[in-house]
Image: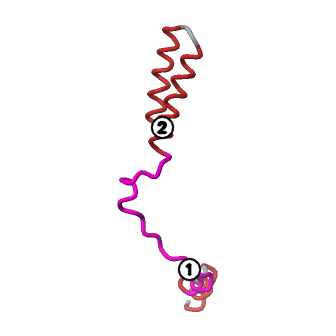
């Protein structure tokens, strides 16, 4: 986002001084291309410490681990 904002400010300045809208548009487009080159490729230094996701659980296992709130309410009423 910083790259886009900086390129927008620079593009506005260049376009204002040259009085050409095309210079503004090309400057902003250049910032967009630079930001895409920075963000889109899978750079190795971003993947050094990958996130370890939890394994996928089946629905039956999830229900057994966490009973629904309606069951908890019924149990509380019985205990009173």
Q: Which residues are magenta?
A: 40-64
Q: Does residue 9 sit above or below 55 in this rendering? A: above
**Label 2 – label 1 distance at C-alpha:** 37 Å
Q: Which residue is mark 1?
A: 57
On the image, the x and y values in percent for residue 21 come to 59, 14
Q: Which of 21/78 is in front?
A: 21
Comparing 68 with 28, the one in front is 28
Closer mark to the observer between disc 2 and disc 1 = 2
10 Å crowding of disc 2: few (<14), some (14-19), many (20+): some
Task: Tell me the SS state at disc 2.
Answer: helix
Q: Is 62 displayed left or right of 45 in the figure?
A: right
Q: Position of residue 32 (x, y in %)?
A: 52, 33
**Of the image marks 2 and 1, the number of the one nearer the N terminus:** 2
Residue 66 figure quarter: bottom right
Residue at point 51%, 11% (across, down): 16
Q: Is residue 46 magenta?
A: yes
Q: Is residue 11 left or right of residue 74?
A: left
User: Looking at the picture, does residue 43 appear above or below residue 64?
Assistant: above
Picture residue at 56% right of the left edge, 80% below the top: 57
């Amino acid at each position: 986002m910083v790259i886009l904002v900086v390129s927008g400010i620079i593009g506005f300045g260049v376009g204002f001084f040259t009085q050409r809208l095309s210079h503004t548009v090309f400057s902003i487009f250049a910032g967009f291309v630079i930001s895409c080159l920075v963000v889109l490729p899978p750079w190795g230094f971003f993947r050094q410490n990958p996130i370890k996701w939890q394994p996928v659980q089946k629905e039956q296992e999830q229900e057994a681990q966490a009973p629904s709130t309606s069951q908890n309410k019924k149990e509380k009423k019985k205990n009173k």
